[in-house]
Amino acid sequence: MSQPAALRDRIGVLRPLRVRDFRLMWTGLAVSMIGDGIYIIALALLVLEDLDRSNSTLALVQGAVLLPQVTLIIGAGVLADRVDRRRLMIAADAIRFVAIGAIGVLALFDVLTVPLLIALAILYGMGMALFGPAFSSIVPTIVPEDLLVQANSMGLFMRPIAMFFIGPLIGGLLVDAFDGAALAFLADAMTFVVSAVAILLMRARHQDRDPAETSSPLDDLREGVRYVRTQRWLWLAMVAATISLLCTWGPWENLLPVVVTEDLFGSASDLGIVYGAGGLASVIAAVVMAQRGSLPRRPLTVLYLSWALGMFAVAGFGVVTQLWQAMLVAFIGEGSITVLVVVWVTLVQRLVPPHLLGRVFSLDWMISVGGAPLSFAIVGPLSDAIGHDATLIWAGAVGGAATLAFMYIRGARGPERYGSLEASEPSITPA
């Protein structure tokens, strides 16, 4: 056995890389994640230095990227269950290549305007909306069930490294070296070419629809909604996510920088260290989950407990008095959320019929983030009224308590109580 193969066998998070199609997909995805990190730096510098130097414009562009991911995600889920998911992912990469490449070209010739940037950001968000459900639902078709935990841990292992370390580092070097963000955007665009080629080389099996089946996309959507309504554990978790994210998403994103800079008298580097502590926790938790290699004996109980801990961590930011304390809170919060995500995605992939996965994942995203816009809208006025520390404390306390309350609603942990986890079998065993 070669040394790289032996290493993959020993380290759980690397074991899915033994599967050719998964290895190809993740090679491309890792490169595109580095591109996402380049984008973070390039966009901020483009808006704040080359366009109108406005934080509001930066927020508007970021919101433009999110808008299609909320409004189009259901349609993307239906498509992921109707067409070849591999081709859908390639189309999503092509859309993102066009959007980001156009930003780079327009910036290079100094003809980019804010309206054009917003329009291209919306196009970029459309590509992201198409990619998400197809990616989440294709994983069980290319890795065996006994590697699902490791496969789902891979994303949470790679994301902090690629998006928040390697990508921003490369992005900053490109912007400095070429005196502007244009070539950084062009480099980001090329990462989607790498991703598309890697996916094109995959041999993932597509389950063709029965030629006699004449259901419309609207019928498919209704089928997905009906299925979720019959699965009490599914829709209860989605509603719980809506409430918990309503309470905590806005405060975490908007008030953590305030805590570090105003309460702890920290710098931008100190803020980066706090975020880095959370990223490190995500990597460690992903490695631990993958090394374990299986779901916990009571996965939904672990899911809700880790979820609640992540929500309560938001309250911790309201009481910290030292930088190391903020780092510890971020470490606990991000590590807990990583456990939650790995368990949740694996449960959905195991328990939901393969032909419904795209729709269920898209409904999960739409319902779960439904409270996020309101969370961002109210956090400013609320923190002005009662103070940012009190807002964080109440947000974490209410979000965590609500999550724990949902855990005790009848049916919330049904699969681990009624034997459906033991009864589930792999839908496809890859060759």
Image (cartoon, rainbow, N blue to C red):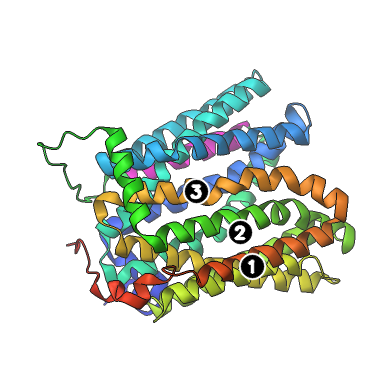
The answer to whether residue 265 of the structure is visible from this angle is no
Check disc 3 and report the residue beneath it: 367
Mark nearer the N terminus (1 vs 3): 3
| Type of the residue with mark 1 | Gly
x 18%, y 47%: residue: 207
- The quadrant of the image that shows the C terminus is bottom left
SS for dot 3: helix
SS for dot 1: helix
Check disc 1 and report the residue beneath it: 400
| Type of the residue with mark 2 | Ser
Check disc 2 and report the residue beneath it: 244
Residue 352 within the segment the image draws in magenta:
no
Q: Which residues are magenta?
A: 182-198
Whether residues under marks 1 and 2 lie with C-beta atoms below 8 angstroms apart, the answer is: yes
The answer to whether residue 44 of the structure is visible from this angle is yes
Mark nearer the N terminus (1 vs 2): 2
Q: Which labelled disc corresponds to residue 252?
A: none
Residue 226 higher or lower than 184, as above or below? below
Mark nearer the N terminus (2 vs 3): 2
Side of 327 where 126 appears, left or right: left
| Type of the residue with mark 3 | Ile
Q: Classify mark 2: residues with Cα within 10 Å, few (<14), some (14-19) or many (20+).
A: many
Instruction: Examine the image and state in which quarter residue 91 appears.
Output: top left
Q: Nearer the viewer, residue 307 or 184?
A: 307
Toward the left, the furthest residue is 212
